[in-house]
Amino acid sequence: MPAKKKSSRSRYGKGASKTVASAMRRKKSGTLRSGKGGKGGKVKSRKQAIAIGLSEARKKGQKVPAKKSSSRSRKAA
C-alpha cells in the first residue's frame, strides 16, 4: 500500500506571516501601539503583538482563520 500523502494546506498564508513579523518588529522598536487607531499604550506583550498582527492581516483580507469567540458569549447563547 502506498503511503498517505500529507496535505500541504496551511492555516495561515504567507502574507499573514509577513504582517505578523512586521508587527513584531514594530513592537521591538517600540512603535507598536494598542487600541483603536493606535491611541492606546505601548505594546509590551509578545502575544499581544501577534494578535495585533493577525488582526491587521484579517483587515487586509489575507488568509487567516476566523477569530475565536469568547467563552462568555457562548454561554449566553
Image (cartoon, grey):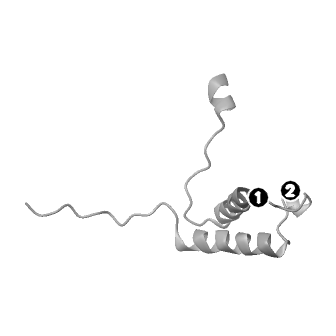
Inter-mark Cα distance, 1 to 2 = 17 Å
Q: Which residue is mark 2?
A: 36
Dot 2: element: helix
Q: Is residue 2 left or right of residue 58?
A: left
Q: Amino acid at mark 1?
A: Ser
- Quadrant of the rendered image containing residue 2: bottom left
Dot 1: element: loop
Label 1 packing within 10 angstroms: few (<14), some (14-19), many (20+): few
Q: Is residue 33 left or right of residue 60?
A: right
- How far across and how far down the image is residue 29, in percent? 82, 76
User: Is 8 situated above or below 45?
Assistant: below
- How far across and how far down the image is residue 7, in percent? 32, 63
Q: Residue furthest left?
A: 1
Residue 77 in view in this figure:
no
Q: Is residue 33 left or right of residue 48?
A: right
Q: Nearer the viewer, residue 51 or 44?
A: 44
- Tell us which disc is closer to us: 1 or 2: 1
Q: Are marks 1 and 2 in contact (CB under 8 Å)?
A: no
Q: Which residue is mark 1?
A: 45
Q: Amino acid at mark 2?
A: Lys
At x 69%, y 30%, the residue is: 72
Label 2 packing within 10 angstroms: few (<14), some (14-19), many (20+): few
Residue 70 in view in this figure:
yes
Quadrant containing the N terminus in the rendered view? bottom left
- How far across and how far down the image is residue 8, in percent? 36, 67
At x 63%, y 24%, the residue is: 75
User: Is 72 situated above or below 32?
Assistant: above
Q: Is residue 17 left or right of residue 30?
A: left
Q: Earlier in the sequence, mark 1 or mark 2?
A: 2
At x 61%, y 44%, the residue is: 68
At x 72%, y 61%, the residue is: 46
- Quadrant of the rendered image containing residue 77: top right
